[in-house]
Every structure is written in structure tokens, then in C-alpha cells.
Image (spheres, rainbow, N blue to C red):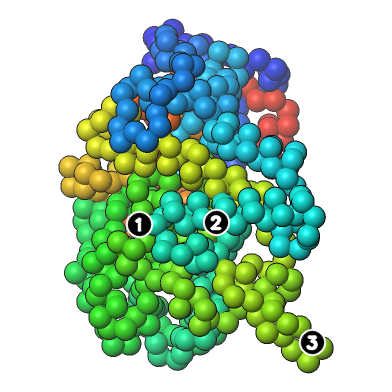
């Protein structure tokens, strides 16, 4: 009834044949139990949602294609922020006819600007040749572009020396590198590794593996009621036995910013080392490794306008030089005999085999020709139109008004610098069902699941959550579209479709019966 009153019909989306009645009860059960809904449940919600595609707010989908003048800016106007969108081809699409993409899954991966895509294409078209191995022109060009990219990344995070930047596949590999090299050589039975309960699995599992093989002990910083790290409790864990403190700069679920500088000072005062998982900070705010004062910092290129398959580790030169190699093979050696090998200097010691050099070059372009040009201060700038803090505030305040919603992490009042991502659950609605509905209804790319933080979700008392995460190219209007779509989805899930139940196509029906 409620749906009909809003002028909605329940016909399936075009191309989906009418076959049999759905079993919404199964969807409800899956949601109520807090389990992953089955494909059939997702299909049911998708089917219902397909009827809602015509409800887009007029004008919201319109893309502004004027190019913003932006070199070196520390802030930009709303119009300029909107103009930036034309740099991103993927943002220009409709996910189905009449439904423009509203991409709010940036914490998982960002979209790529054409400057980066062009550089990747240019490199493969003109300079492609294996690096560090040849005397011919292309090999020289390729090597130079690769090493210049290293310098650009170093500059982007203010590393004192570009040799301290090791290219890895992603942040996960970078953390494993530290665990398997420095960790294996320096951590012993009884040593303590201090982490937080909010860590991504990438900054937890490698330390669990290390602890299992060495007999080291893991200790965990917990949360305050306001969704921030309990800094006092965390610091109370750092003592004489602590060998390593590893924490995220910004949580990919809570959106909180952790006080890395303060923690690093304390850790160093007891002789411990500090690793910072900067996956959710480097893309969004100016990050300076020298100011943070950590010993290693990791990030993934694909979350910061760069390609997939490339990330980086920054480490203090003396620590990297003093650590054993990671993988063995070409590039990382100095001299090899049948009896043994000596190793190259950093960073090559840690870059065995052919690196993802084209992707590294494109990451360099993302850092320098795109993000630096844009101005990282402007990306994060509070109180400026288009700045991510503005998006974070709007996202939080719109979400918080939804009935039965539980938001995780600190509010923008509690932590004004919090990230522009919000995780949440809604009473009676499974996150996966909500994500399916908002996608089908309004083209909103929203993530659902545990976001690779199962222990944190355990602390929060849930198994999954939904996450909307913005980047500088998102607009206030897009957040409105997403939250409006959520409101409709919540209503649908709670009351169920009024009148006739939608019907499933035979394949989905078979899944439902299975
Ligand atoms: C905080 C954090 N750390 C680590 C990772 C792992 O990144 P990747 O999968 O690119 O290695 C992610 C990815 O979502 C993340 O958000």
C-alpha cells in the first residue's frame, strides 16, 4: 500500500521474465538472522527495487563537464568541485538507462582520472620495456619513468629519500613485507605487538602469522563509546615488551583519525617501532611521513586515483637496509653464485622480479599530475565547498535522521577531521539487502559486508554493515540521492511490497528453492 501510495508499481525490470511468486519470507529471515542473504534473496530485493528506477530527482544526474581551473589550489568552489568530475570517465555513465552512477564506494577503490588513464596508455604505447635491464632506448626511458614515479610518490608523502619507497602490489603486500622481513628478524617469543581492534585484516593477519611463528603476543587497543580509539588504554599497552605498534591512520569502518604522531613518540620512547596503515588517509589528506614520525607507512595506489596492482611501502632507510630481503629472484640481487647471493641496495632489494612498472608510472601521475595539482589541502579542506569534510558532515547528518539507524564511528562534532565515509546498520534490514536496493533503485554504489574488519564488527556487535564512502569528486546532491534511496529501501524491507508480490525469473526461483 505504501508503495502504491507513492505512485510506484511492482513490475520487474525490463528483461527479467515473470515466472513465479517470490518468497519474501526467505529474504526477511536472512536479514533478521544477520546472515549474508542468498542470491535468491538479493534477486528478490533487486526485483522489487527495479520498479523504483524512475524516481531520480530532476537535475541530479546532470554532469557538469566544464573543466575546473585548479593548479595548486588550496580550496575550490562548488562549481570547480563539480567540474572535476569531468576528469573521471567512469563517473559519466548510467548504470542502467536513466540512472546515472552515484559512486560512493571510494574506500574500497577510487575511480581514475583521464590524466592517469592517459599516462598508462601513453607509457604502454611509447615507453614499454622492462626496467633496469637493458641498454636500449626504450629500456632507458622505461627505467627513467619508473624511477621518476618513485620520486613523485616520495614527494607526495614527503619521504626524505626516494630510495625509501618500495613499490609493492598493494598495502597488504607492503605490511606482509615488513612482517616477513623486519618482523621475522626482530620479533621473538614474548615480545609484544600492539594493534587496535579496528585494523583491516591486512594489518592484523600478517601479525597473527608472525606471532604464531615466533611466540610473540598481540595486544589490542579498544574503542571508546564515541567510536574513537581509546587512546589512554591503547597507550597503556605500550611498554618495555613492546617491539612494534601497528595501527591505521584512518579506519575504513569508523572513519576516525588516529593520533599517530602522539603514539609514535610514545612507542619510540620505549624503543618500539611504528607501522602506519595509511590506506584511508593518503588518498584524502596531506600526509607527511616525517611529521607523523612512524617507521613504515603503507598505502594502495588504487584508492588514490592510481591503477590496481601497485602500492607502496615507505620505510626509514636504516631499517629497510638492516632488514633481510622479502622475495628472492631477479632485480633484488647484487652478485649470485651457485653457492649464494648478495643483495641489491634499497629499494630494489625488496622488489624481486619484474615490477608493475607501468602501473607505478601511472601512480606517479596520480600523485603529481593529479592529486598534487588538485591540492591535497583542498581535498580535505573543512568548511570549503566540495571539501571532503563538508561531504562527511552532510553524509553523517542525513544518515543520522533515518529511523532505526546505527552509525559507527565518531560524529563530525566529536571529530571534525573524520573521514568522509560512514558505516551503519538499520534495524530489521540486512546491509546486503540495502546495498542491492539502492543500486537497483538509484544507481548508488554502496558497499556492504564486514569490510575486512571482522573483529571490529564483532566489537560493534554485528556481522556486517553498510558503508557509503565519498571522495573529492562526489557532490552533496549525490549524498542526497543515496540517502533518499536508503529511505525508500528501508521502507520496502520493513513493510514489504504492497499488493501483488513480484515474480522471479526461473533461475532465481530455482536458487530460492534450493
Ligand atoms: C585501512 C585499510 N588497510 C588496508 C587495506 C588493504 O588494501 P589493499 O587491499 O589494497 O591491500 C584497506 C583496503 O580496503 C584498508 O581500507
Q: Does label 1 or label 2 sit earlier along the sequence?
A: 2
Task: Indicate the quadrant where residue 245 lies.
Answer: bottom left
Task: Indicate the quadrant where residue 122 lies.
Answer: top right
- Looking at the image, residue 12 sits to the left or right of residue 336; the answer is left
Q: Nearer the viewer, residue 453 or 472?
A: 472
Which element type, helix, strand or loop, lies under badge 2?
helix
Q: Residue at x 27, y 83 (%)?
A: 270
Q: CA distance from mark 1 to mark 2?
A: 16 Å
Which numbered marker is on residue 288?
1
Q: Does label 2 or label 3 sit earlier along the sequence?
A: 2
Q: Quadrant of the N terminus?
A: top left
- Looking at the image, residue 386 sits to the left or right of residue 308; the answer is left
What residue did someone put label 3 on? Answer: 337
Give the percent coordinates (x, y) of residue 74. 30, 36
Which numbered marker is on residue 150?
2
Q: Residue at x 25, y 46 (%)?
A: 417
Give the percent coordinates (x, y) of residue 394. 28, 31
Amino acid at each position: 500500500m505504501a508503495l502504491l501510495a507513492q505512485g510506484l508499481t511492482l513490475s520487474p525490470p525490463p528483461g527479467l521474465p515473470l515466472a513465479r511468486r517470490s518468497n519474501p519470507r526467505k529474504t526477511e529471515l536472512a536479514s533478521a538472522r544477520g546472515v549474508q542473504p542468498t542470491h535468491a534473496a538479493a534477486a528478490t530485493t533487486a526485483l522489487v527495487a527495479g520498479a523504483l528506477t524512475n524516481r531520480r530527482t530532476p537535475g541530479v544526474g546532470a554532469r557538469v563537464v566544464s573543466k575546473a581551473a585548479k593548479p595548486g589550489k588550496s580550496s575550490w568552489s562548488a562549481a570547480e568541485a563539480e567540474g572535476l568530475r569531468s576528469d573521471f570517465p567512469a563517473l559519466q555513465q548510467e548504470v542502467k538507462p536513466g540512472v546515472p552512477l552515484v559512486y560512493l564506494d571510494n574506500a574500497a577503490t577510487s575511480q581514475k582520472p583521464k590524466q592517469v588513464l592517459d599516462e598508462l596508455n601513453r607509457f604502454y604505447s611509447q615507453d614499454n620495456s622492462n626496467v633496469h635491464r637493458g641498454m636500449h632506448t626504450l629500456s632507458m626511458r622505461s627505467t627513467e619513468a619508473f624511477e621518476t614515479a618513485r620520486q613523485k610518490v616520495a614527494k607526495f608523502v614527503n619521504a626524505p629519500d626516494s630510495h625509501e619507497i618500495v613499490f609493492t602490489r598493494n598495502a597488504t603486500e607492503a605490511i606482509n613485507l615488513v612482517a616477513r622481513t623486519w618482523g621475522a628478524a626482530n620479533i621473538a617469543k614474548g615480545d609484544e605487538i600492539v594493534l587496535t581492534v579496528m585494523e583491516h585484516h591486512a594489518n592484523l593477519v600478517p601479525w597473527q602469522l608472525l606471532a604464531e611463528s615466533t611466540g610473540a603476543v598481540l595486544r589490542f587497543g579498544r574503542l571508546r563509546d564515541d567510536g574513537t580509539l581509546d587512546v589512554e588504554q591503547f597507550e597503556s599497552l605500550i611498554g618495555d615488551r613492546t617491539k612494534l605498534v601497528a595501527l591505521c591512520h584512518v579506519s575504513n569502518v569508523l572513519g576516525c583519525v588516529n593520533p599517530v604522531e602522539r603514539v609514535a613518540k610514545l612507542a619510540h620512547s620505549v624503543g618500539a617501532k611504528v607501522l602506519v596503515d595509511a590506506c584511508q588517509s593518503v588518498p584524502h589528506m596531506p600526509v607527511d611521513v616525517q611529521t607523523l614520525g612512524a617507521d613504515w607507512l603503507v598505502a594502495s595506489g588504487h584508492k588514490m586515483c592510481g591503477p590496481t596492482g601497485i602500492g607502496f611501502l615507505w620505510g626509514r632507510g636504516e631499517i629497510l637496509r638492516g632488514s633481510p630481503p622479502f622475495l628472492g629472484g631477479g632485480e633484488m640481487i647484487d652478485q649470485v653464485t651457485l653457492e649464494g647471493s648478495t643483495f641489491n641496495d634499497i629499494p630494489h632489494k625488496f622488489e624481486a622480479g619484474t615490477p608493475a612498472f607501468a602501473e607505478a608510472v601511472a601512480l606517479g601521475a596520480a600523485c603529481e599530475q593529479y592529486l598534487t595539482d588538485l591540492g591535497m589541502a583542498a581535498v580535505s579542506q573543512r568548511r570549503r565547498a566540495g571539501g571532503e569534510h563538508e561531504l562527511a558532515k552532510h553524509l553523517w547528518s542525513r544518515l543520522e535522521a533515518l529511523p532505526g539507524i546505527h552509525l559507527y564511528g565518531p560524529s563530525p562534532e566529536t571529530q571534525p577531521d573524520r573521514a568522509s565515509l560512514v558505516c551503519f546498520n538499520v534495524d530489521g534490514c540486512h546491509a546486503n539487502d540495502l546495498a542491492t536496493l539502492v543500486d537497483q533503485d538509484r544507481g548508488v554504489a554502496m558497499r556492504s559486508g564486514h569490510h575486512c574488519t571482522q573483529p571490529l564488527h564483532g566489537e560493534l556487535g554485528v556481522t556486517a554493515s553498510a558503508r557509503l564512502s565519498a571522495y573529492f569528486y562526489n557532490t552533496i546532491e549525490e549524498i542526497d540521492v543515496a540517502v533518499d534511496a536508503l529511505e525508500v529501501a528501508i521502507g520496502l524491507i520493513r513493510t514489504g511490497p504492497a499488493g501483488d508480490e513480484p515474480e522471479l525469473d526461473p533461475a532465481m526461483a530455482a536458487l530460492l528453492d534450493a
